Amino acid sequence: MKNELIALKEKAAESVVKALTEEELEGLRVRYLGKKGDLTRILKSLGSLSPEERPIIGGLANEIKEVITHSISDKKKVLKNQGIDKRLKQESIDVTLPGRQPPIGHLHPITQVIQEITGIFKSLGFQVAEGPELEEEYYNFDALNLPKSHPARDEQDSFYVSSDKLLRTQTSPVQIRVMEKQKPPIAIISPGRCFRRDAQDATHSHTFHQIEGLAVDKGITFADLKGILHVFGRQMFGKDTQTRFRPDFFPFTEPSAEFAITCFKCHGKGCRVCKKSGWIELGGCGLVDPAVFGFVNIDPEIYSGYAFGVGIERLAMVKYGIPDIRMFYENDLRFLEQF
């Protein structure tokens, strides 16, 4: 049995030296030292020895067990260190290389256009005003001179959440809220999201953005409105831009007009962008209807004002030559990274 133990020791030492992975070492530990291992099997046969031989063979067996245990442990440390060295070589960093610049995001084209427009009007003395997107029917319709019988009050055209609350269909309610709290002089612009039950297509979306302006003071005329929009058109599209006004109708302004600018692509000669007309329509405008002043307790005999509105998506599509409004909302980085 002594010779068998010595042979087991030599065989185990040889196996440990040849092992290349920690998994192999674990297998050797089970093979030699496990409950059903070779050394355990030998120890179970100690009962067949004489009382004089048992302590000698038992001591030798324990000694061999410790030797095998330590050799496996030492080899595991060696393999672990080798693995670390290998990883360090594979994952080494060349500190002389220039740093890698992570990708940097930028503003959405809609946000860029809003900031550009607000920057122009802020330089002209306007302040930015905001209001709730979930609006009361009174502010969205009634106070804007849109009576119950008006077609825009049809629930099929709006997103109602209750009988008197809806997602605002325009940013004009902000003008009413401002005039309720602030007396003239007033000069504000109100950018923001709006919602209408429009079918989704290349030029319509149920969610869109508007920016509307309002100025109220003594002696304001249509000439002031034309002048401010003319300045806006030139700062937005170039110093040679001309502005055109044509009669239109809006319930909350009187007189009202549709305003357009000369096409910035063809400079009024006619092209694909302006559909050969030479003009690009931007929005509606007009003098504030005296009936609207009646809802906010501003005397129309003393004060007058003008209002205008521009569709942000419409303006961005014109400025950047974007053919489909849906491209703004698809979150396709191939499109957004161009801006």
Image (cartoon, rainbow, N blue to C red):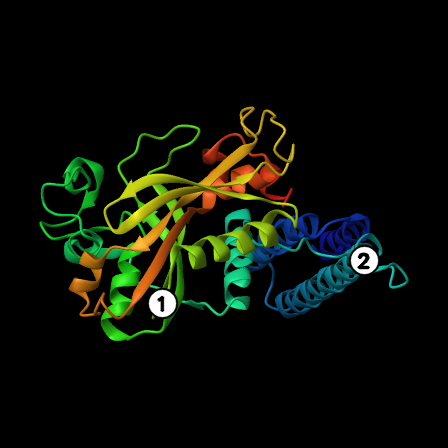
Q: Is residue 143 left or right of residue 108?
A: left
Residue lying at 19% horizontally and 67% vertically, measured from the top left: 296
Disc 1 element: loop
Q: Position of residue 232 (x, y in %)?
A: 54, 54
Alpha-carbon neighbours of circle 1 within 10 Å: few (<14), some, or many (≥20)?
few
Residue lying at 75% horizontally and 56% vertically, measured from the top left: 9
Label 2 belongs to which residue?
82
Disc 2 element: helix
Q: Which mark is residue 42?
A: none
Q: Amino acid at mark 1?
A: Gly
**Viewer-closest of 335 and 287:** 287
Q: Work out how far the residue at label 1 is from the one at label 2, CA to CA, in angstroms.
A: 87 Å
Res 35 visible: no
Res 216 visible: yes
Label 1 belongs to which residue?
219
Tell me the quarter of the image containing the N terminus: bottom right
